[in-house]
Amino acid sequence: MSTTPPGWYPDPSGQHGTRWWDGGQWTQHVDGPTAQAGRPRISDHVSTDTVFVWILALLPLIALPISLMYHPEFRSTTLAPGGVRTVDPSSIYTPAYFLLQLFSVLLFAGEVVLAFFDHRELRRRGVVRPFSWGWAFLLSPVLYLIGRYVVVRKVAPGRPMWPLWVGIAVAVLGVVLGIARAVTTFQQVFS
């Protein structure tokens, strides 16, 4: 029988800050700065790639052809009284422009929802503290994909990361096509 009263004491394993001593033995309860540092590995038979992460990686491919359908006609107009020539806003802000903007908002919302479902599914599969789906609100789904696979590599090392590579490739393709589109648009405006 121990004379040490129950309480939090330095973890004898050295892995955590403190561990609870119940008066007779050490428990599984830990606390301190390193208590949550580790994530347990998941079983090798548990897949880390969900249908949601694949859709999230491929979803921007839908936006590429739709964005190429918008073709503004840059007409100029003269402003009175100085006779200054400028681009006529009605030649840019067409119904197609507003439909493209609406589609972009819906696509963004879809990406955030997919990140939420992917996060939830990873938790169901045993991943402790998966990367937060809230990061999908920033910039693009690629940010969520990268963070997601940082965590997945910790709990399932050595697994392939195909959705991440596909998502990065799709993002690069979008940037290249966006730059090409911007160059042709600027040429049209300034010619």
Image (spheres, grey):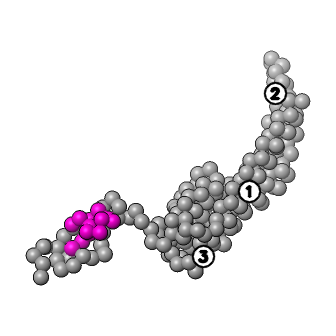
The number of callouts visible is: 3
- Which residue lies under the disc numbered 1? 170
Residue 71, quarter of the rendered image: top right
Residue neighbourhood size for the residue with mark 2, other residues' Cα within 10 Å, grouped as few (<14), some (14–19), many (≥20): few
**Relative to 90, 43 lies left or right:** left
Q: In the rendered structure, which disc, 2 or 1, sits on the residue that comes first in sequence?
A: 2
Residue in the picture at 52% in, 78% down: 43
> Would residue 30 be visible to someone looking at this image?
yes
Comes first in the chain, label 3 or label 1: 3
Element at label 3:
loop
Amino acid type of the residue that numbered disc 1 sits on in the rendered structure: Val
Q: Which residue is mark 3?
A: 47
Q: Is residue 20 magenta?
A: yes
Q: Which residues are magenta?
A: 9-21
Say whether disc 3 or disc 2 marks the residue closer to the N-terminus.
3
Camera-near label (3 vs 2) is 3
Neighbourhood count class around disc 3 (C-alpha, 10 Å): few under 14, some 14–19, many 20 upward: few
Residue depicted at x 56% and y 78%:
44
